[in-house]
Image (cartoon, rainbow, N blue to C red):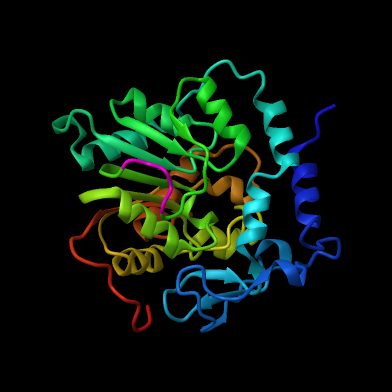
């Protein structure tokens, strides 16, 4: 019988941590201290008693990212993302899948409209961390000349079996891809990187001048995480070491040589966070609209363009 994902994650976790007591205790050989973007320890405690996994988190005084201290180092994150146990689970769970379906057409239409896809045939796009290929498939069907990068062996092979172009590699400067992309997408993947600065540098290297960068992430300062963190997923320090808010992500993008232009706040499933019985669609829509209007949604997307010249050098605080 195939193991559940929770069993696989427990095995991967216990290889580096001890969560049996409910507290994260990273072994010394897998620890790293320093901000995922600034790479310095200049921070203050991030207090939220509702965070999952009892993480001890801090907020960087320079860029504003929230991260565990200590956090997993590069070696540990690389081992986890392509671990044999995880590949075995993914191969078993995806083995019976006949076709890849895109469930995010609204996001793709938004991207196509903002980036002017209709006026640019052959628009080249790259998705970083394409996973099982749903969004990448949608990009291809929408007319993008799209390719993906995926560090997990099983997921990359699954995408290739279904006709998608995927490079099985870690996304870092020097990744074997032809430069000149019109659009690079980090869709719920930028916060997995050990070095956010390195990931954005690689994206800048591959984008053409004026090219688009699309980052979708969850908002660490959102209503859901501040009030219902465990129900809404909380902060998972093992796999998500770089937790951003729209404000901190905008600062990071500007510092990395991009010009943020559009921010899209996505609907919240408020009734699920509150544990209410029944869907209550009217209530959910009304509260979700209010949260979006206050720019406090759990999920948001930010679209920016590559600026000319060299990236700024970090100086001053967010």
Horizontal and vertical percent position of residue 99: 53, 18
| 117 shown above or below 304 | above
> Is 289 placed left or right of 65 in the picture?
left
| 281 shown above or below 294 | above
Nearer to us in this view, 314 or 118: 314
**Can you say which quadrant of the picture contains the N terminus?**
top right
Quarter of the image for residue 315 reads bottom left
Say whether residue 176 is magenta. yes
Nearer to us in this view, 207 or 269: 207
Number of numbered discs on residues: 0
Q: Is residue 299 visible?
A: no
| 9 shown above or below 42 | above
- Residue at image point 46% right, 33% down: 166
- Residue at image point 51% right, 79% down: 40
Q: Main secondary structure of the magenta part?
A: loop
- Residue at image point 31% right, 49% down: 206
> Is 296 placed left or right of 80 in the picture?
left
Horizontal and vertical percent position of residue 14: 81, 56
**Can you say which quadrant of the picture contains the C terminus?**
bottom left
> Is 308 placed left or right of 314 in the picture?
left
Q: Which residues are magenta?
A: 174-178
């Amino acid at each position: 019988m195939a193991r559940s994902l929770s069993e696989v994650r427990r095995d991967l976790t216990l290889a580096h941590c001890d969560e049996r007591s409910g507290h994260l205790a990273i072994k010394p050989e897998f620890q790293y201290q320093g901000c995922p973007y600034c790479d310095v320890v200049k921070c203050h405690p991030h207090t939220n008693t509702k965070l999952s996994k009892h993480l001890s988190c801090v907020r960087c005084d320079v860029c504003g990212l929230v991260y565990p201290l200590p956090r997993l180092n590069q070696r540990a994150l690389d081992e986890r993302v392509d671990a044999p146990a995880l590949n075995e689970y993914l191969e078993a769970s995806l083995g019976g899948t006949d076709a890849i379906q895109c469930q995010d057409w609204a996001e793709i239409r938004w991207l196509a409209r903002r980036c002017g896809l209709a006026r640019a045939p052959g628009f080249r796009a790259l998705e970083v961390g394409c996973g099982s290929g749903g969004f990448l498939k949608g990009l291809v069907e929408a007319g993008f000349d799209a390719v993906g990068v995926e560090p997990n062996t099983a997921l990359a092979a699954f995408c290739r079996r279904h006709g998608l172009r995927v490079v099985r590699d870690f996304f870092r400067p020097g990744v074997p891809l032809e430069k000149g992309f019109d659009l690079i997408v980090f869709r719920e993947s930028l916060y997995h990187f050990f070095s956010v600065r390195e990931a954005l540098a690689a994206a800048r290297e591959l984008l053409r001048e004026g090219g688009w960068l699309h980052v979708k992430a969850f908002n660490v300062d959102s209503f859901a995480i501040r009030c219902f963190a465990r129900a809404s997923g909380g902060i998972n320090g093992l796999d998500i070491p770089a937790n951003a808010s729209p404000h901190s992500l905008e600062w990071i993008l500007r510092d990395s040589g991009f010009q943020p232009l559009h921010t899209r706040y996505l609907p919240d499933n408020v009734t699920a966070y509150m544990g209410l019985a029944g869907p209550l669609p009217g209530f959910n829509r009304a509260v979700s609209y209010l949260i979006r209007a206050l720019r406090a949604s759990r999920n948001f997307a930010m679209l920016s363009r590559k600026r000319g010249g060299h990236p700024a050098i970090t100086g001053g605080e967010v």
